[in-house]
Image: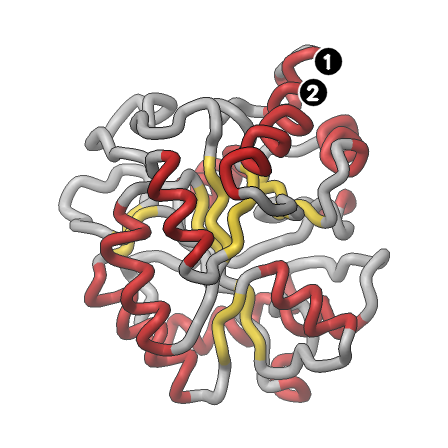
Amino acid sequence: MYHSIADTRDDPYRVTVSPVRFARQLHWLNDRGLRGVSVRELLDATAAGRAKGLVGLTFDDGYADFADSALPLLRRHGFTATVYVLPGRIGGENAWDDDGPRKPLLTEDGIVAVARAGMEIGSHGLRHVSLPTVDTATLAEETRRSRELLEEITGGPVQGFCYPYGHIDARAVRAVREAGYRYGCAVDPGPLTCAHALPRVHIDEQDTPLRLAAKRVLHPLRRRRPRDLDDGLGIGLGLGNATRTGAGLEAMSGRDAVREAS
């Protein structure tokens, strides 16, 4: 779960990875025969029995620097990724962060360009609010309406949802499922782990090759497997036996995991 690929000097929530570090992390994957893909591609490959060696890459919030900094590096390696954007804040900034720099978000044209480059566009809700705290009408807007708006922008189906801050409860997971999403991404959903609350791993600027190797081993021990998905998807998301599959890491970075842990 990445967020922003940019300068890291002012990064209180650990949402930013420098382009240099990001390039090294992609090289680390490539050198081990692992290929970064969108969650949509990972699900499709799992259904076809071809998920071995695939790693789901996700970028939350839809920062404008994805197009400038992350996309060229991903394309250089032949990787894809999923970018979760906020249709209620298109072309705006990260106003939900109290501290740190203001970061511009993708415009509508930027979202279309990213999708045309082969990346998956998913929803991060409308405005980046904690779903367990909102009323029923707002929950419907954040899940169902955000999907409708993104489908209007991209002209294609939006299959994935990502929970702002990683905050979930049973009601939020049910709303995502009923809004028609194929899957949902969380951080550490614990007993709620399922296709609509997939766990992910925290990767940040400090993640050197040694730390990545450690996380690849530890991730399947720390996270539950989604019981409503077959084994291939769990393996591809880094939830299975990394030694047996050659996969085992979902690249992530950021504030959501930090706040969940605090």
Residue 1: in sight, yes or no? no
Left or right: where 100 falls relative to 128: left
Whole-angstrom CA distance, mark 1 to mark 2, is: 6 Å
Q: Is residue 118 above or below residue 47?
A: above
Residue sitting nearer the eye, 158 or 81: 158
Residue 135: in sight, yes or no? yes
Residue sitting nearer the eye, 111 or 125: 111
Question: Residue at the location (76% across, 43% down)?
Answer: 192
Report x, y in % for residue 30. Answer: 40, 83
Mark 1 Cα-neighbour bin, 10 Å: few <14, some 14–19, many ≥20:
some
Choose top left, top right, bottom left or bottom right for residue 130.
top right
- Dots 1, 2 in contact, CB < 8 A: yes
Helix, strand or loop for disc 1:
helix
Residue corresponding to mark 2: 140
Residue sitting nearer the eye, 193 or 114: 114
Q: Is residue 82 above or below residue 22?
A: above
Left or right: where 157 falls relative to 5: right
Amino acid carrying label 2: it is: Ala
Report x, y in % for residue 238. Answer: 61, 69
Report x, y in % for residue 161. Answer: 62, 41
Residue corresponding to mark 1: 136
Question: Residue at the location (25% across, 66% down)?
Answer: 21
Amino acid carrying label 1: it is: Thr
